[in-house]
Amino acid sequence: MRFHVLTLFPEMIEQGIHTSILGRAIQNGYLQVETTNIRDFSANKFHRVDDYPYGGGAGMVMEAEPVFRAHQSVTEKLGRMPRTIYLTPQGKVLNQTMVEEFALEEDLILLCGHYEGIDDRVLQEVVTDYVSIGDYVLTGGELGAMVLIDAVSRFVPGVLSNEESSQFESLQDNLLEYPHYTRPEEWHGKKVPEVLLCGDHKKIDAWRHEESFRRTKERRPDLLENAFLITCACDETQPGAEQIHKLMDELTRYGKSIDLARKKIRRQKNRFGEKEFLLLQIPIEPAPDAPVMDPGEYTENFYGRKTPLVLILSGGEEMADEQWNEKAFLIESDLCARGFLIVALVREVPFGEGLKRFSFTLRDLIYTGKWKNEKILASADAL
């Protein structure tokens, strides 16, 4: 992955990223970080890039032309226009979902402002994303750029020796990470919890989930408002079951699965509460070799209590849109009557990078609380 930083202080970036994990990743070719000095594109013989603001006020404003030319020098070299991120306290506050989404890009241009900011006209022309690293003001965007580079780089293959280190940690599931321990087993009279020494991974995972919840409640209770236990329910005999499990793995570490192909599961009452989130995939039309079942049979014993639900309707490729919409409406209406809140209604789960991008859309809906006001009604591929 390549980062292109437009800045007035390239040495600040260069000195900050060539150490530790990032330094090794650059040395091993997993990352490239290039800096472009905006002053080099000034038309002023003194390389001045700022001027007084129109309308008066304190401070100076960076001129549009040097920024535009610096940006143009990078896009001409690449032969295309990559995403351009302007680091600004007026942007969307950086979160883990945004970080993972940025990590899918081959190139990112990071624009660092200074003084009172940059002439807004050039921002309108070149910027695709406005990003903040928090609700406070710095002297320039360079520190924000380094924060973003560090966070995004952790999801670039090869940068970390253990890919799980980036996938499962604080803020996964909107929970803080559980506590960690290493040798010795006892230190200053404090012992490592016995469950971590038992070798039973199910018990260890349960303890870690409980500790994550406890720590979040203690230190970041605000996160719990949109923290959910995610359940994946699908017919394992139908095409697409593997994809929905991959989708759940992208959304949560602590999810559980229900196989709707089992009669015993369908016949027992399955109840879900307000703090649960259901990923439900049912065939709107069965696969050619699968038993013929009415879609309603899958969920006749499902009951929610204002439970958010993502409904994925597989099959039906040969159906006319009018017929598909009619069947989908009946399924959706039945689930709503059973106490579920439909957050998304989509056809199929996409593959590869499409699945990751779809998971980012869902995570943004789930973990920010947008699901209360927004709804997806589209093909997952279109997202």
Image (cartoon, rainbow, N blue to C red):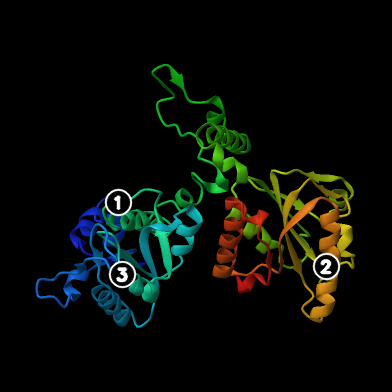
- The quarter of the displayed image where residue 144 is located: bottom left
Q: Which residue is mark 1?
A: 138
Q: Position of residue 177 (x, y in %)?
A: 50, 40
- The quarter of the displayed image where residue 63 is located: bottom left
Name which residue lies at 50% across and 34% down: 219
Q: Secondary structure at mark 2?
A: helix
Instruction: Please give the label number shown on residue 119.
Output: 3
Residue type at the position of mark 2: Phe
Q: Mark 2 or mark 3: which is in front?
A: 3
Separation of marks 2 and 1 at Cα, in angstroms = 51 Å
Q: Secondary structure at mark 1?
A: loop
Q: Position of residue 172 (x, y in %)?
A: 54, 47
Outermost left residue: 45
At label 1, counting other C-alpha atoms closer than 10 Å, the crowd grade (few under 14, some 14-19, many 20 or more) is few
Q: Are marks 2 and 3 in contact (CB under 8 Å)?
A: no
Q: Is residue 139 above or below residue 214?
A: below
Q: Mark 2 or mark 1: which is in front?
A: 1
**Is 85 on the left or on the right of 100, as rendered?**
left
Separation of marks 1 and 3 at Cα, in angstroms = 18 Å
Q: Which residue is mark 2?
A: 329
